Image (tube, rainbow, N blue to C red):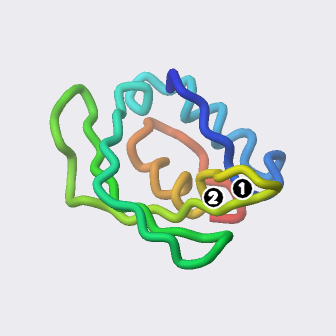
Amino acid sequence: MEDKAEVAGNGGDHQLMLEALAEDPQSRLLRVRIGSVTFTSDLNARVGYTLFPDGRKTGPDRPGAPVRQDGTWKVSAETVCSLTQYGEGVPRAPIC
């Protein structure tokens, strides 16, 4: 993944999963197109997105859940956990 997104929560809880996603050849091909953003509060939002591995749409549009933590919007652990299926042998963090 060329652009790094911060993940909400304790990074140590998902460190192995994030490292595996970043290094996995399959997940490195993923690109995302954001279709919608709806703010549900000052700290939470819902994001509609579509994944494109290798330039082709995969599956239906998906909901994502960014959260605002320490003044910065971050990708929720829930959303990152849903991406592990696109890697080969990417371990899911215990919080998933």
Position above or below: 45 against 77: below
Left/right placement of residue 2 relative to residue 20 reads: left
Q: Give the residue displayed 55% in from the left and 52% down from the top.
A: 80
- In which quadrant of the rendered image does the C terminus lie? bottom right
Position above or below: 11 against 46: above
Between marks 1 and 2 in the image, the one whose residue lies nearer the viewer: 1
Q: Which residue is mark 2?
A: 77
Determine whether the residue tagged by mark 1 lies in a helix, strand or loop: loop
Left/right placement of residue 57 relative to residue 67 reads: left
Closer to us: 6 or 58: 6
Could you tell me how far apart the alpha carbons at marks 1 and 2 are, in whole angstroms? Answer: 6 Å
Residue 94 image offset from top left, x and y in percent: 71, 61
Residue 70 image offset from top left, x and y in percent: 82, 55
Left/right placement of residue 80 relative to residue 29 reads: right
Q: Which residue is mark 1?
A: 8
Q: Looking at the image, do the residues carrying marks 1 and 2 touch, with CB atoms under 8 Å apart?
A: yes
